[in-house]
Image (cartoon, helix red, strand yellow):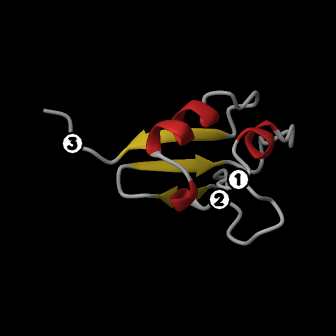
Amino acid sequence: MAQKTHHYSNGEITVTWKPGICIHSGICFKGLAGVFDPRRRPWIDMSQATTQQIIDQVKKCPSAALSIESNTPVD
């Protein structure tokens, strides 16, 4: 069975969330509440921080339920 994923983009990057492996540690929310707010739908709002801030926060996800993909072509 394919793992359910959700994708959120700001044009530069796409954040992928895999709810099936999320351990709900809250690290994303505590570190960048404007972007990651589980009370809101959709719960990720990419317009609330810079691309670099989002990248830095996603790297802190302990379960790797959040990941980053670049939307910029590499030369």
* CB atoms of marks 1 and 3 within 8 Å: no
The nearer-to-camera label among 1 and 3 is 1
Determine whether, in the image, residue 20 is placed left or right of residue 46: right
| Residue position for label 3 | 73
Q: Is residue 51 above or below residue 74?
A: below
- Crowd around label 2: few <14 · some 14–19 · many ≥20 (10 Å): many
Instruction: Give the Cα distance between marks 1 and 2.
Output: 5 Å
Q: Residue at x 46, y 58 (%)?
A: 9
Place of residue 23 in the rendered image (x, y in percent of width and height, measured from the top left): 85, 39
Which structural element holds mark 2?
A: loop
The answer to whether the residue labelled 2 contacts the one labelled 3, judged by CB atoms less than 8 Å apart, is no
Please, what secondary structure does the residue beneath circle 3 have? loop
Q: Residue at x 54, y 38 (%)?
A: 53
Outermost residue, left direction? 75
Residue 39, quarter of the rendered image: bottom right
Q: Where is residue 25 drawn, in percent x and y?
A: 87, 37
Looking at the rendered structure, the kind of residue marked 2 is Ile
Along the horizontal axis of the image, is 60 left or right of 72?
right
Q: Position of residue 41 (x, y in %)?
A: 72, 72
Q: Nearer the viewer, mark 2 or mark 3?
A: 2
Left or right: where does residue 33 sit relative to residue 68? right
Q: Quadrant of residue 28?
A: top right
Please tell me the numbered disc located at residue 36.
1
Query: Identity of the amino acid at label 3?
Result: Pro
| Position of residue 38 in the picture relative to residue 68 (left or right) | right
In the rendering, at what x and y percent does residue 68 appear? 50, 39
Q: Which element type, helix, strand or loop, lies under badge 1?
A: loop
Residue beneath label 2, please?
Answer: 44
Q: Are marks 1 and 2 in contact (CB under 8 Å)?
A: yes
Specify the amino acid type for callout 1: Phe
Identified at 55% across, 42% down, the residue is 54
